[in-house]
Amino acid sequence: MNITAPLRRLARIIPDVPAIIRADDTTISFAALDRAIDAVARRLLEAGLCAGETIGLGITGPDESRGLITALALARLGIASSHPSLPAARRIVFAPPAQPGDVAVDDDTLTPPRLSTSPSR
């Protein structure tokens, strides 16, 4: 079983329930989280990543949900993540690529048009 399978199941049975509360107090529902994971996974596949690779990924910053969604997308694809300072063939960055081989995941990828957020209650 893939670690993201329970999230996909929750997206089907309780789609509108908040799954994540972001630093800015907006929420991401289980359905929106599942769509975001799929959107990032597609972006990573388009960049040439594939199952079995190890990718450098840092998830700190003002919006850690970006790193969480990306880590879950990697897991959904069967790609391992490590700290970006450790040896890895490639890194995922949340800004323009800094090194050859970097894969950029931007806010447009993390917030596709169908990913709606709302203020938390």
Image (tube, rainbow, N blue to C red):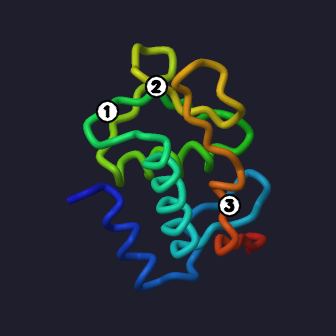
Asked if the residue under mark 3 is in contact with the one under mark 2, i.e. CB atoms within 8 Å, the reply is no
What is the spatial separation of the Cα atoms under label 2 and label 1, in whole angstroms? 9 Å
Residue 5 picture location, percent across and down:
31, 65
Q: Is residue 44 above or below residue 53?
A: below
> Where is residue 69 shown, x and y percent of the image?
53, 52
65 versus 117 height, above or below: above
Position of residue 79 in the picture relative to residue 95 (left or right): left
With 70 as the anchor, is 22 left or right in this view?
right
According to the image, label 3 marks what residue? Answer: 111
What amino acid type is highlighted by mark number 2? Arg
Residue 33 image offset from top left, x and y in percent: 54, 66
**Location of the C terminus (image quadrant):** bottom right
Frontmost residue, 71 versus 77: 77
> 96 or 48: which is nearer to us?
48
Query: How many numbered circles does the render carry?
Result: 3
Q: Earlier in the sequence, mark 1 or mark 3?
A: 1
Tag 2's secondary structure? strand
Q: Quadrant of residue 19?
A: bottom right
Q: Residue at x 40, y 21 (%)?
A: 89
Label for residue 90? 2
Residue 88 point in image, percent of width and height: 40, 20
Is there CB contact under 8 Å for labels 2 and 1?
A: yes
Determine whether 113 is above or below 88 in the image.
below
What amino acid type should be assigned to the residue bearing mark 3? Answer: Thr
